[in-house]
Image: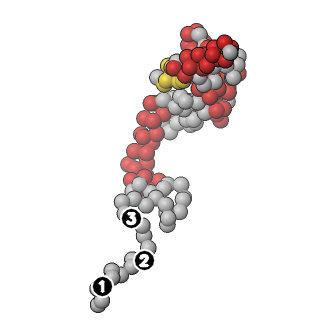
Amino acid sequence: MEKEENKKHRQEDREETLVRILGYDVLGSRTIYAGLTKIKGVSWSIANAVCKNLGLNKQGRISDLSKEEIAKIKSALEELKVPEYMKNRRMDPVNGETKHLLGPDLDMRKEFDIKRLKKIKSYRGQRHSLRLPSRGQRTRSNFRRGGGAVGVKKPKRGKKS
């Protein structure tokens, strides 16, 4: 009985614990592998690579990490050592570099890219400005905004013309 109560206490403590990594709060009850994916710009493959590079147990809990290990994770994410094809910003149009962006930098860069497309009046930029899909999806039934259902309207009862 005591063991079961201790397990419940440990689980409650982990749920309440929040660990801050690169400006994102990660629940302490999550595994390291799943917790790293809560950071914007970190996919499952990047989280796996970071765990392997640092020699961390992927199934360990975030709340069990020491401050030094968290600092190592931060530095590993900032200076990512993965193959070029895994990075999210390959051949940047501004300077031609390949880098991996995280958090607000990723949002800001995406916003600037969309503004650039609109400014040069490319097809994708025009689709963005009209709030339509830019990757070839059909628009017959989806991407409707502002109106109700489209179809044949029934005539109102009582009025004959």
Residue type at mark 3: give it: Gly
Q: Residue at x 49, y 66 (%)?
A: 140
Q: Which of label 1 and label 3 is nearer to you?
A: 1
Q: Callout 1: helix, strand or loop?
A: loop
Q: Residue furthest front?
A: 1
Q: Is residue 33 left or right of residue 117?
A: right
Question: In which image quadrant can residue 49 be found?
Answer: top right
Residue designated by label 2 = 152
The quarter of the picture where the N terminus appears is top right
Residue type at mark 2: give it: Val
Residue designated by label 3 = 148
Q: Is residue 28 left or right of residue 83?
A: left
Question: In which image quadrant can residue 46 be found?
Answer: top right
The x and y percentages for residue 102 are 51, 29
The disc label shown at residue 158, or none: 1
Label 2, label 3: how many angstroms apart (C-alpha)? 12 Å
The x and y percentages for residue 134 are 49, 54
